[in-house]
Image: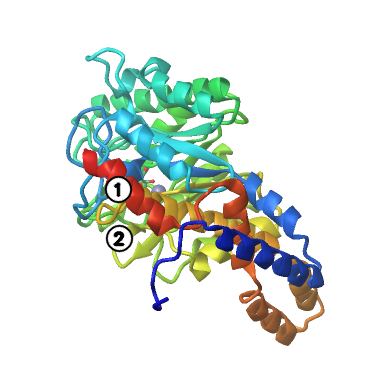
Amino acid sequence: MEWGEPLGKESDMNETAIRKGYEYAKETFAAQGVDVDAAIARANAIPVSMHCWQGDDVVGFDGVGALTGGIAATGNYPYRARTPEELRGDIDRAMALVPGTLKLNLHACYAEKSRPDVDRDAYTIADFARWADWAAAKGIGLDFNPTYFSHPKMDGDFSLSSFKPEVRRFWVEHGKRSREIALEFAKRTGKPCSVNFWMPDGYKDTCVDTVAHRALMTESLDEILAAPIDPKLVPCALESKLFGVGLESYTVVSHEFALGYAITRKIAYTLDSGHFHPTETVSNKLTATLQFVDKALLHVSRGVRWDSDHVITWDDELQRLMDEILWNGLERRVFIGLDYFDASINRIAAWAVGLRNARKALLSAALAPAGAIRAAERDGDHTRRLALLEERKTLPVGAVWDYLLLSSGATTDLPGEIARIERDVLAKR
Ligand code: RNT
Ligand code: ZN
């Protein structure tokens, strides 16, 4: 066989080799005091919320066309999902490629309107009935996001903090409806439904009254959150951002604003990996903020220069983030969602690669001999701590991962499976 020749898809030999690898890994990890099966169970139980918007370049179905708000999906790979049926089909296909517990993170612009004249300020569960039925049938939970972009009622890029009262009114109502819809989702799926508030509000150039918009934003958010809706069923979160494209100089909901608001209003803080200065990392911020907020929501993403939304790879930061969650037992206080959009590659592959990386990093965190590494730190033995951290990187995580794929029916041949889906399904669009 030539080097690089494709392997047969999940052949018997492959399966035998994977099982052998798993046995080897089990012994290797046991020698480190780690129970592989317990680690798999722990990593699999943590829900990862799949963002619906990777499938159609954040276009949605409530009919507004161009993407605004300082975010952009670049690339023109064919086969974008154009209808709710195509999008749900693609989500099903991507989910089938990923092991472990998943949720779907839905944006309000993915409404399937129950009547043609209903707008975002008046949406109800009726406008999302098909999504609720779909999720309930699959037995998965939903998360929700009001959509404060790509809409004629935006005042430029301002929404909740616009100087125009009628603009604020419309968007405040949208926020209220979003919490009501989320409550219905939670009831129908039997699982909590988070609501993430992200508003692009900001200026391209120097803002000279930086207080006014922030005061309005606070007032609008307070009004949205006034209705008593059980935060256990509908945890609300506020997402900060450093800047947007075309909004480089001033962002109303900056890091300090969002963290301060979340602490004082007792809601969750959303940390998006792409929303900070390039040398800042969300993994470094998580336990710092969790001293003061009860819950955090993650938008796991990958910033590259000025784009905050590249497909997540299994890099050091992703691993560090998952280590922080598992090593500190924060599974119930941190909601993990993904947030990226790449229109330059097969969109189902973009989903699957990122979701698999999130799960892989969770598995690696669960498999790591964290107790031994921490003991070294407690003993003040920083040499041993560093050596153990480096040794950990070459433990046979890959062998356990392959076994997890095999035993959960997620493919061990992702490129082959993607090519098959593209040929048999997508190319017929
Ligand atoms: C934008 C924010 C926001 C969006 C999604 C579509 O910078 O990250 O979370 O990406 O809501
Ligand atoms: Zn985000």
Q: Report whether residue 396 is seen.
A: yes
Q: Is residue 300 visible?
A: no
Q: Which element is circle 2 on?
A: strand
Identify the residue at horizontal 51%, vertical 24% (top origin).
137
Left or right? Give the position of 309 relative to 38: left
Query: Outermost residue, top direction?
Result: 115
Label 1 CB less than 8 angstroms from ligand 1: no
Above or below, comparing residue 167 to residue 276 in the picture = above
Q: Residue at x 68, y 59 (%)?
A: 366
Coloring scheme used = rainbow
Q: Quadrant of the C terminus?
A: top left
Identified at 37% across, 62% down, the residue is: 303
* Residue 249 sits in quarter: bottom left
Judge depth for marks 1 and 2 and give the one in front. 1
Up-down relation of residue 188 to residue 97 (above or below): above
Where's the N terminus, which quadrant? Answer: bottom left
Q: Nearer the viewer, residue 132 or 275?
A: 132
Q: Which mark is residue 307?
A: 2
Please indicate whether residue 417 sits to the left or right of residue 166 in the image: right
Q: Rounded to the nearest whole Å, what is the CA distance between mark 1 and mark 2?
A: 27 Å
Residue 74: x, y in percent? 22, 54
Kindly indicate the quadrant of the structure image that contains residue 310. Answer: bottom left
Q: Label 1's element?
A: helix
Which residue position holds label 1?
A: 422
Residue 393: x, y in percent?
61, 75
Asked if 267 appears above or below 131 in the picture, the reply is below
- Label 2 sits on what residue type? Asp
